[in-house]
Image (cartoon, rainbow, N blue to C red):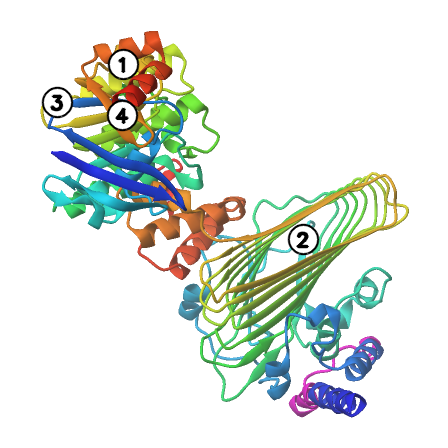
Amino acid sequence: MMADGEAAMTEQRAEGAEAFLEAYERASAPNGASWFAPFRKAARERFRSVGIPGPRDEKWKYTHLGGLAKQTFEMGSPDGGELTSVDLREAQVADLDCPQMVFVNGVFQEELSSLPAPSAGIEVHSLSEALLERQEELEAFFSQEPGFDFEIFADLNTALFSCGSYIRIRRGTELRRPLYLIHLTSRQDGPFMSHPRNIIHVEEGAGLCLVEDYCGPDDFVYLSNPVTEFQVEKGARVLHHRLVREGDASFHISSLGVRQADDSAFSSSSFCLSGGMVRNDVVTLLGGEGIECDLNGLIIGGGKQHIDNHTRIHHARANCNSRELYKAVLDDESHGVFNGKIYVAQDAQKTHAIQTNQSLLLSPKAVMDTKPELEIYADDVKCTHGATVGQLNEDGMFYLRSRGIDEETARVLLVYAFASDLVSGIELPPLREAVERLLFDKLPGHCEPAGEAKGAC
Amino acid sequence: MLEIKDLQAKVEETQILKGLTLNVGPGEVHAVMGPNGSGKSTLGKVIAGHEDYIVTGGGVTYKGKDLLELEPEERACEGVFLAFQYPVEIPGVGNNYFLRTALNSIRKSRGEEELDAFDFISLAKEKAALVRMDEALLDRPVNEGFSGGEKKRNEVFQMAVLEPSLAILDETDSGLDIDALKAVADGVNSMRNPERSFIVITHYQRLLEYIVPDYVHVLHDGKIIRSGGKELALELEEKGYTWIEGEAVKSAS
């Protein structure tokens, strides 16, 4: 019986996988450079054989993809979709006053974008163009490395992507302004999918601040399956912000991969403010010594949202520090997941790794699953992890209410207080204010962002 | 103005107040003293409306209204203020923002116009000076990283801004050095007027040298066992709580 059931399930998963690949054939999207064809083919075969992960896959235990497998997504038109600059302004999370790349339905929109002026320090390309011209630079990004295991959806991306960005910050270049990548999905006739790919190479001693923003409409079924890869060379510094503002019926499955060399620093903060089913996989490979790696994430869940953050930090060499702080605020019937794996290889002595996961449940039907995983093969390391799941602090509620503040506003203030360290950690003021505003919009009650109190008030 | 009649209250399954009666008139300052565990803080929490404190008997009326029927924020809007023994830290929310939100919801309930950020800040600065609180604390998150003394000053500062008609100070003197104690007392004294009443809950007589009460009550095992003028505090200081507890046991038998 079991065997039959499993066979049926495997078949179903394979069929589900096949549907994605067929949609790609139908769209007859440009296949890109010929050198790249074997990579695509290999990724396609891996995706075909693994299929869509089921609940028995340990890494997908709390995030069921039955809803995804049932859908048939189309690739959309090769030109993406219509979007005016007015629509764009509305869609932007904030005016970051910086160069930006705009993607609509997975397709790069040159007219809407404002690329930085070509200079010796920075190159920003559409990936489809770069693939044709820069095989040598890009090849390494598609080669498999041990210790750098993406989930199967990254293979799906490799098999299907048609657009994305290739960003290269030259040795020693410190950018004054951030770079903003905005990925918009617009309403289509039927379920739609996009697989953007961003490849970012930050060379020795260079510095970059990158904002990635994914947003789409409510009441529309779509899948965005982006993969973003960073190569952070010796002594380079990267500040990365990731916003998920997807529609309530969407699937957002992202993979972020980071390879760090000696003395580099990478700091990423992700903010999941809306979306139907969201899964973020972060894989970082600390491949040198003296590396700093910070991964932060904030989930604001409501309705029937499902948001899953999976991280894997691979300490391969000695004397590196990693810190993780993931927080979740879950209301209604939302479901949050955190799975953080810290792998410390035998050579990675003097590793210092801290992982913290804190969740606030605002409703009795909200659920949080949290799972730290430590796998340590070195003997001289300091690794700590802590997870808490709780409700709003009653003493705090009473304190605020005893000052005349109504219950709803008091709740909002305390939720804000819970999330504030992640929000106030955003170093770009317009982005920080925008995230603050989105956070307050999401919470019940009528309250303006409290950030103004720090100074202006 | 405040009438507490035979008040009985429990926390979880522990009965703490066992028939407390106290009347506070307009402009009066009442000190409530007593040993640890006698129910002093419970009295403050019950008046302010903490939901963990369940009233099992008796009643509290304030300006003729049944106070126990009101939510904590409604009580605040009626003019009740509790200065906490252990003020709560609220990271990420500026002290100014928090207090302006509080003041405006109280003003709104009274049909008064809300204060904008500019009007508020000049009011806040004036009141901070009154309790000799560092203005820099206005911009900091509520109580976060404040020293014990700063937290207590912040409570009195909030009181000065919200201008309650009944202020309950719950061991506001505990953990204060003499300078901070004087600053807190000066703040309170400057707010004394014929309409505003105070209940000063304290373990020690020291605070009462600076905030001179009209009445002193001794709380023991959930009841007031002795009331008197300010000299009662001195007598207590001299003879200790065991003396009065002994008296209470004698008179009961």
Total labels: the figure holds 4
Q: Residues within 10 Å of mark 4 (few under 14, many from 20)?
A: few
Residue found at the very far right of the displayed protein: A347
Q: A300 or B224: which is nearer to us?
A: B224
Give the numbered dot on residue B193: 3
| Residue B245, percent from left and from top | 33, 20
Q: In the image, what residue occupies the spot 16% across and 47% down?
A: B109
| Callouts 1 and 4 close, C-beta under 8 Å | no
Give the residue at x 83% y 46%: A288
Above or below residue B107? Residue A84 is below
Q: Earlier in the sequence, mark 1 or mark 4?
A: 1
Q: Quadrant of the C terminus of chain B?
A: top left
Kind of residue sitting beneath label 3: Asn
Distance from the alpha carbon under mark 4 to that under mark 2: 88 Å
Task: Look at 74% across and 70% down and name the residue there.
Answer: A58
Residue B123 seen? no
Q: Badge 2 local density, few (<14 within 10 Å), some, or many (20+)?
A: many
Query: Residue at 40% across / 43% down in the picture?
Result: A396
Which residue is denoted by mark 4 in the rendering? B252
Q: Marks 1/2: CA distance?
A: 70 Å
Does residue A118 show up? yes
